[in-house]
Structures are given as C-alpha cells and as structure tokens.
Image (tube, grey):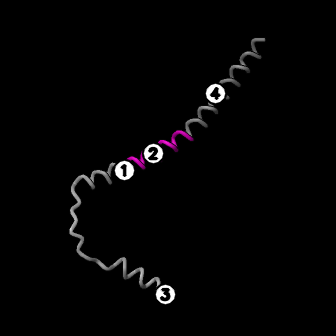
Amino acid sequence: MIRLILFILCCFFYSSVAFAYLGPGVGGGVIAATIGIIVAIFAALFGLIWFQVKRLLKKRKEKKEQHQQDKID
C-alpha cells in the first residue's frame, strides 16, 4: 500500500516538457466558468430561500385579512 502511494506521489511530482501552448483564452474561460458556478450556487440558494419567505408572507397576509374580516362581521 505504501509503495502504491509513493508511486502515485512520484507520478504527480514528475514533470516533463509538454511542448504545448495555452493561450489567454484558456484563462478567460476558466474565470468565466468559475464565476458561472458561483452565480449558479447563489441563484439556487436565493431561489430556495425566497420561495419559503414568499409563502410565509402570503400566509401572514391571509391570516391578517381573515382577522380583519372577523372584526368587521
């Protein structure tokens, strides 16, 4: 087991020349994807929280209207 872990670590730390070019578009794509993921998470959380709050406010409003209706009668 230790040999396997050591082998995997050696593979990770061994570097070789790649002869590859990553242009500036790759950096922009990574930044855009990261921002998109963060916005999607916040939008999902906002949606989950907003619908619960909206339902609570609606129930409160209906209860208040019913209470006022009972006073009038």
**4 or 1: mark nearer the eye:** 1
Instruction: Inspect the image, locate mark 2, and give the three-letter code of the amino acid beneath it.
Output: Ala
Measure the C-alpha gap from mark 3 to mark 2: 41 Å
Label 2 SS? helix
| Residue 67 x, y percent position in the rendering | 73, 21
Residue at image position (47%, 84%) is: 4
- Kindly identify which numbered label has been placed on residue 40: 2
Question: Quick check: 52 left or right of 68?
Answer: left
Q: Give the magenta range.
A: 36-48
Residue 42 magenta = yes
Which secondary structure dominates the residues rendered in magenta?
A: helix
Q: Residue 52 sits in which quadrant? A: top right
Residue where numbered disc 4 is placed:
58
Tell which of 3 and 38 is nearer to you: 3
Instruction: Using the numbered discs, state the Cα–Cα distance from disc 1 to disc 2 in whole angstroms.
Output: 10 Å
Q: Amino acid at mark 4?
A: Lys
Q: Which residue is mark 1?
A: 33
- Mark positioned earlier in the residue sequence (4 or 1): 1
Say which of 67 and 23 sits in front. Answer: 23
The crowding category of the residue bearing disc 1, from other C-alpha atoms within 10 Å (few below 14, some 14 to 19, many at least 20), is: few
Q: Tell me where residue 20 appears, x and y as whole percent.
A: 22, 65
Vertical position of residue 68 compared to residue 2: above or below: above
